[in-house]
Image (cartoon, rainbow, N blue to C red):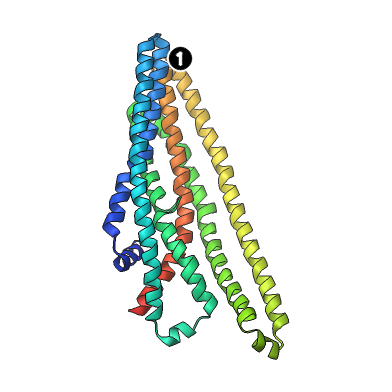
Amino acid sequence: MLESLRNIFKHLGGGFLYAFLLILRTPVDTLLCIINALFLKGVFEAMEQGTPEALARCCICFVAANGFVFLYNGILWGEFAVFSARMVGKLRLKFLDALQGLPLGRIEAMTDGVWITRGNADVKMTWDLLSGALNIPHFVFAIFRIAVASVIMYCISPLFLVIELAVIVPHVFLRHRYVVKPAEQLIQKAQKETEQTAVVASSLLAGGDTVRIFEAEGMLEDYYTESSLNIVRTRLKISVRKAWGEFMQLLLGRGGYLLLFLLGCEMVRRGGMNFGSLTAVLQYRGAMVAASMMLMNSLVEIKKNSVGMKRMEEVFDDKQ
């Protein structure tokens, strides 16, 4: 897939700017998590010590830090939105230019419905992959957040990190094995069925006279109906796989919290840590769980949209 990304940006340009904006945006979610964890830790410690001044300082620092991060994030996403709008327009123009440069035999080998699908769906899927929600940007954000939260949890207590990894790693493996991979195959199947349905619909609408001459209306209508039902069945199977993923998140996610609560309460009782530190650990644990879910959901979307990117790449390469 990395080779496909390089190939797309070779045609579009702007790869360095895209990577630069992505790097600038990556720490934002992690910073918000750290700010929230430190705020709760400071608040509970100030309440335990009975110091209103420390509590007020925590609140002021929390508001100021969040204001700075949100301002930075807003400016950055504004720049990224402008960049995305410019690039998606360029992608459409490049696709039309590549289509005009294809050999006539290559164009006539597929129907108008297929090319219309590629010009709309594949362009959208390609740019969703690069800038959409739960795609490459959020995949990068999730990896960074997991790495930073793991380091912080290790510094607080290596045992906490071991327990967390013992819960998250099987969760990620099972979700990838039984949700992500099957969903990828089903998404590819749904994409092909959508193309076939578009071809039949185009034949019924554009070639009505020819269809009536050969008395093929009934056959094409039956095929269109069956193909549409197959699309619905395939999308239903995708939804079932995603539902299984949500069930695993509920089971393993809550189970990890119970283990940390039991261990943390025992450490607080023995004086090994205070309640503020335990609250901060739970915040970092929540960040790791949310990031792992983001990682898995991003993998599903990346697999789905990479199909459109590869087909756009085929058009560009055929032109050459």
Q: Position of residue 215 (x, y in %)?
A: 72, 87
Residue 277 seen anywhere in this rendered image of the structure: no
Q: Residue at x 37, y 78 (%)?
A: 318
Residue closest to the far bottom: 213
**Of the pair 4 and 213, the residue shown nearer to us:** 213
Q: Residue at x 65, y 68 (%)?
A: 228
Quarter of the image where one finds residue 316: bottom left
**Of the pair 223 and 242, the residue shown nearer to us:** 223
**Of the pair 151 and 159, the residue shown nearer to us:** 151
Residue closest to the far top: 50
Q: Please, what is the three-letter code of the amino acid marked with disc 1?
A: Arg
Q: Position of residue 243 (x, y in %)?
A: 60, 48
141 in relation to 120, above or below: above
Circle 1 sits in a helix, a strand or a loop, which is it?
A: helix
Q: Is residue 307 left or right of residue 214?
A: left
Q: Residues within 10 Å of mark 1 (few under 14, many from 20)?
A: few
Residue 246 seen anywhere in this rendered image of the structure: yes
Quarter of the image where one finds residue 166: top left
202 in relation to 256, above or below: below
Q: Position of residue 254 (x, y in %)?
A: 54, 34
Pick the quarter of the image with the C terminus: bottom left
Q: Position of residue 302 (x, y in %)?
A: 44, 57
Q: Is residue 244 left or right of residue 132?
A: right
Q: Residue at x 49, y 54 (%)?
A: 300
The residue beneath circle 1 is: 269
Pick the quarter of the image with the N terminus: bottom left
| Label tally | 1
Quarter of the image where one finds residue 61: top left
